[in-house]
Amino acid sequence: MAKTQPERWSIAPYFFVPDVVAAAHFYRDTLGFSFERFWGEPPRFCMVSRGGVIIMLSEVPQGTLLRPNNIVAREGGAWDAYVWVPDADTLHAEFVAKGATIARGLCDQEYGCRDFDVLDCNGYRLCFGQPLS
């Protein structure tokens, strides 16, 4: 019997932002993501992508209280998204060179990953990590 490939799923976090154009440009210029277009006139929505990861950015009206998950103080912290990557060290160096805000530096974790945290331009905390084994 032929062995079949395991089913592959993916997910796209949905981040509310005060300025979708500024957020998309941050993800492109600082984190190396790309995007094809904006939706709405004026722009209200954009999907940025890199390495198969998609993050949806949706503009909310000015004055709307934005509360990224990482704002909630908890033991051990919290991420708005965890992204598995093949080489955390190289990605960390790229982000540092582009001026990204590194919220937690590279380290090996007890859960078996080498990872680091980045804050985006709206306070969302993304963790980028690779399995140690």
Image: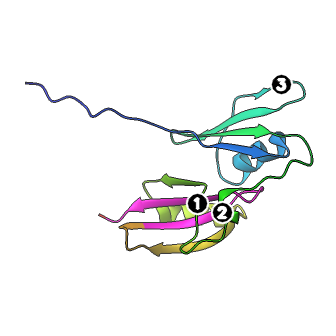
Q: Which mark is residue 40?
A: 3
Q: Which tag, 1 or 3, sits closer to the chain's start? A: 3
**Image point (83%, 52%), residue name:** 65
Provide residue 2's location: percent of width, then percent of height: 12, 25
| CB under 8 Å between discs 2 and 1 | yes
If the image is split into quadrants, where does the C terminus sit? bottom left
| CB under 8 Å between discs 1 and 3 | no
Determine the CA span between mark 2 and mark 1: 6 Å
Q: Which residues are magenta?
A: 114-132
Is 67 magenta? The answer is no
Per the image, the residue denoted by label 1 is 79
Q: Which tag, 2 or 1, sits closer to the chain's start? A: 2
Please indicate whether residue 113 sits to the left or right of residue 55 in the image.
left
The correct choice, above or below, for 10 with respect to 129 in the image is: above
The correct choice, above or below, for 11 with respect to 122 in the image is: above
Q: Which mark is residue 123?
A: none
The kind of secondary structure the magenta stretch mainly shows is: strand
If the image is split into quadrants, where does the N terminus sit? top left
Q: Secondary structure at mark 1?
A: loop
Is 123 magenta? The answer is yes
